[in-house]
Image (cartoon, helix red, strand yellow):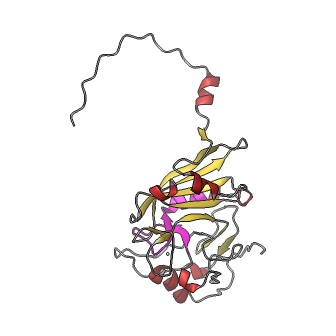
Amino acid sequence: MPAFVRKGAPALLGAGTLCAALLLTACAHPAPTTPAAPTTPAPVKSSAAASADARPRTAPHLPGLGPLTQARIPDGATQALVVTGDTENSNTATAVLHQRAPGGRWYEAGGPWPARNALKGWTADHSAGDLRTPIGVYRIGDAGGRLPDPGGRLPYDEDPEFAISGTGFRGESLEGSFDHVIAIDYNRVPGRTPLDKERPLGADKGGGVWIHVDHGGPTQACVALDRDDLRALLLALDPAAEPVVVMGPAPELAR
């Protein structure tokens, strides 16, 4: 499927219908210390050594991921956004963008960023309206929003249909939540605008799961990042790196 590059294209879907479907029904006392023995001053590091210390620290595998989760990351993926919640029922998380170096080791390339997920937490068997975010490893390759592309490399659909109104679970305004979004390839056809409503697994399995702007409360099923963090993520993602999102509660991802 060829990648779309729509900017300011005519609306394809009713804004009220789509946004309602996405956000309103689916989106001791311390131990005593012993005085240290006198030491000689540490030698001053050379500029070369200091430069080496500033290099990204790498790891052979993504931190926090167990062998089963790690094995689900496609061989060609060299960017991975890991979104980790504390427990199955938590609706706040932490997101870190990792990059794979040419030698195969991973390093942190963005974050850590505070994130939110669905009101009731996470699930390995998502269905429409369960108010949980699907656990898993999914590709992320298509973006869009009500506002113009901030300069990223993903195909981007600027469209007024991304407008949203109403209030969230805490009475917070939802306006601006879809100013920028990244579609998560859960029950959708890759290569299309995030607004596309085709659901290969069927409508009962939900859909429209995005990474979008944080509106100050938990989501229906999506992952939300602060506006500036989301823009930074959009600028960092590279389609050539075949980026994925790895998301779920820490105990599940550690398997």
In the depicted view, which residue is nearer to us: 22 or 60?
Answer: 60
Q: Residue at x 68, y 85 (%)?
A: 10
Report the quarter where the N terminus lies: bottom right
Where residue 3 appears, as percent x and y from the top left, is 75, 72
Q: Residue at x 58, y 89 (%)?
A: 14
Left or right: residue 23 versus residue 1 is: left
Q: Residue at x 64, y 75 (%)?
A: 158
Where residue 25 appears, as percent x and y from the top left, is 46, 83
Where residue 202 appears, as percent x and y from the top left, is 60, 84
Start-end of magenta stretch: 209-234
Left or right: residue 13 versus residue 39 is: right
Is residue 234 in view from this perspective? no
Left or right: residue 248 versus residue 50 is: left
> From the viewer's perspective, is residue 102 above or below residue 212?
above
Q: Residue at x 54, y 51 (%)?
A: 65
In the depicted view, which residue is nearer to us: 204 or 110?
Answer: 204
Q: In the figure, residue 68 lies in which quadrant?
A: bottom right
